[in-house]
Image: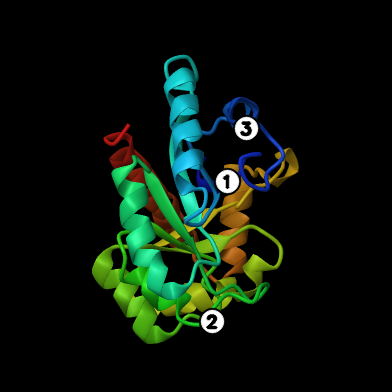
Amino acid sequence: MIDLHTHSLYSDGELLPSELVRRVEVLGYRYVAITDHVDASNYDLVLERLRVAARALNSVCATVLLPGVEITHVPPSQIGPLAASARTLGAAIIVVHGETLAEPVAPGTNRAALEADIDILAHPGLISREEVELARQHGILLEISARAGHSLANGHVAALAREVGAGLILNTDAHSPRDFITRERAFQLGQGAGLSRAECDQMLANAESLARQATTSL
């Protein structure tokens, strides 16, 4: 299992990075990204702390920790510059908090994210076909979310991604120990969104490819 969207107590998660990694290590995860919520006020501090944690843990743990950020409720015009700054500071994974049906995310967030240097557009809600085309063109993965509320549009995202040929990734958006899932549960969630078993395999392969690529920045 690979999960590239989780949260520690550096934002609204419950766990220290060390406990988060230990929890998923026991479950057999090979890679995990901690992508705490950031905006202009805290992205540098969060990344500094997560990079310290990655250096301390990756030499001794079976699970590779990738330090990242989730750019959250940032005005669309500021997403691109903030993503570029986060990348410069060593973010291995950059997620943007998309236009989920569960929260009042600013319109235009999905498009701004897909025009920026990011890796994953999380829970993009009722994303448009044109935006899915942008994701495909830019190699940005669209998230199928295991998190309640954010998962409401999973079927819509999966169907459009299939039509357009955009890449998908399944993440937990975990905030607590009970949020982590098994590989088989990931397949169930993918199939619940209308994906075939082969498409679920591809979704997990996309996570592996991105994780391997991200390790080069550590």
Location of residue 80 in the rendering, given as x and y in whole percent from the top left corner: 34, 65
Question: Where does label 2 land, which residue?
Answer: 126
The Cα–Cα distance between marks 3 and 2, rounded to whole angstroms, is 31 Å
Disc 2 secondary structure class: loop
> Which residue is identified by label 1?
6
Amino acid type at mark 3: Leu
Q: Position of residue 140 (x, y in %)?
A: 34, 63
Q: Is residue 204 visible?
A: yes
Query: Spatial distance from mark 2 to mark 1, Cα to Cα?
Result: 22 Å
Q: Is residue 110 left or right of residue 36?
A: left
Q: CA distance from mark 1 to mark 3?
A: 9 Å
- Picture residue at 47% right of the left edge, 61% below the top: 96
Q: Amino acid at mark 1?
A: Thr
Q: Which residue is mark 3?
A: 20
| Residue 167 appears in view | no
Q: Position of residue 25 (x, y in %)?
A: 57, 27
Q: Which of the 4 image quadrants contains residue 10?
A: top right
Instruction: Give the farthest residue toward the front.
Output: 41
Disc 3 is placed on an element classified as: helix
Q: Give the residue displayed 45% in from the left and 81% down from the top.
A: 108
Q: Nearer the viewer, residue 125 or 48?
A: 48
User: What residue occupies the far top of the structure in this picture?
Assistant: 60
| Residue beneath the point at 52% across and 48% down | 42
Quarter of the C terminus within the rendering: top left
Residue name at image x 37 percent, y 77 percent:
132
